[in-house]
């Protein structure tokens, strides 16, 4: 599980992370958003001690980048280890996290002349396909999260958890489930088993105390 340390540095925040950047790392986003808002120019990430990064971790970084752009700020990766470096290079997202700074602070280039072992080739190709797929489907997934947030009074983190849990319990790919949820806005109906699992996931989700619970009849329909 990823942990972090935040140190103000002029008009920016320097964030050092260690651990694993995966689905669980999204719990750090609210604090990162707060630190980004408090900063004058943005945030610099030092990810040398991150030993694992998958598409969920990358999506968390992309969400942080998008928030910074909305605020007219920047998020840069000043240094990183092999795990993060490989994900940024394979997905072509490294340039999103580069910015002004000292040359020695920039993320090191990928070593040349070193090819992965043959037995790792298929794993790497599968990882690239998964990451690119995640980047392509993020808009639909974000729309589905927004629908759940508006319909049931969920936080972004709780809406994400509901999507993941329903996807797992119905054996449905996350982007397919998100597309079906977005389709309900146009009048389509979710399969009954998906409605049941979605209702159960929403019932177990955390909500802010000040936000009322959803009225019956949203995308999930009535629980049985």
Image: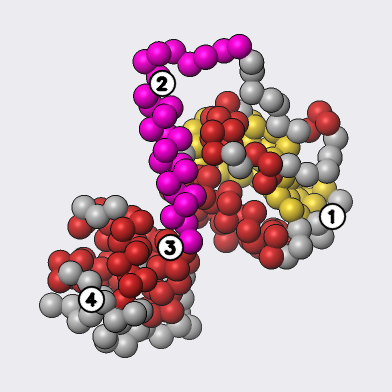
Identify residue for label 1.
11
Image marks 1 and 3: residues in contact by CB distance under 8 Å: no
Residue 203 to residue 94: above or below: below
What separation in Å lies between label 4 and label 3 (alpha carbons)?
Answer: 17 Å
Evaluate whether residue 39 shows in this view: no
| Snapshot quadrant of residue 70 | bottom right
Q: Residues within 10 Å of mark 4 (few under 14, many from 20)?
A: some
Residue 178 is left or right of residue 108, and the answer is left
Q: In the rendered structure, which segment of residues is drawn in magenta?
A: 113-139
Q: Where residue 146 sits: x, y (%)?
A: 45, 72
Q: Residue at x 70, y 60 (%)?
A: 69
Residue 175 to residue 115: above or below: below
Viewer-proximal residue among 7 and 64: 64
Identify residue for label 3.
140
Viewer-proximal residue among 212 and 185: 185
Q: Residues within 10 Å of mark 1 (few under 14, many from 20)?
A: few
Q: Residue at x 83, y 31 (%)?
A: 103
Label 2: element kind: helix
Identify residue for label 4.
189
| Snapshot quadrant of residue 222 | bottom left
What separation in Å lies between label 1 and label 3 (alpha carbons)?
Answer: 34 Å
Q: Where residue 144 sits: x, y (%)?
A: 40, 68
Q: State which tag comes first along the sequence, 1 or 4.
A: 1
Q: State which tag comes first along the sequence, 3 or 2.
A: 2
Q: State which tag comes first along the sequence, 4 or 3.
A: 3
Q: State which tag comes first along the sequence, 4 or 2.
A: 2
Residue 109 to residue 189: above or below: above
Q: Residue at x 73, y 42 (%)?
A: 98
């Amino acid at each position: 599980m990823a942990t972090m340390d935040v140190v103000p540095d002029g008009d920016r925040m320097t964030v050092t992370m260690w651990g694993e950047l995966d689905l669980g790392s999204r719990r750090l986003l609210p604090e990162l958003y707060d630190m980004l808002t408090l900063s004058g120019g943005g945030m610099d990430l030092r990810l040398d001690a991150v030993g694992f990064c998958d598409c969920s971790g990358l999506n968390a970084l992309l969400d942080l980048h998008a928030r910074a752009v909305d605020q007219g700020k920047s998020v840069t990766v000043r240094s990183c280890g092999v795990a993060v470096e490989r994900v940024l290079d394979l997905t072509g997202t490294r340039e999103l996290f580069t910015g002004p700074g000292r040359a020695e602070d920039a993320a090191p280039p990928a070593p040349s002349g070193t090819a992965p072992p043959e037995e790792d080739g298929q794993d790497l190709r599968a990882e690239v396909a998964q990451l690119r797929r995640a980047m392509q489907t993020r808009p639909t997934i974000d729309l589905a999260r927004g629908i759940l947030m508006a319909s049931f009074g969920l936080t972004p983190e709780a809406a994400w958890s509901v999507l993941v849990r329903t996807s797992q319990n119905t054996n449905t790919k996350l982007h397919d489930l998100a597309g079906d949820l977005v389709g309900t806005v146009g009048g389509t109906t979710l399969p009954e088993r998906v409605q049941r699992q979605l209702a159960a996931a929403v019932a177990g989700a955390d909500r802010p105390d000040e936000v009322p619970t959803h009225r019956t009849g949203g995308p999930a329909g009535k629980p049985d």
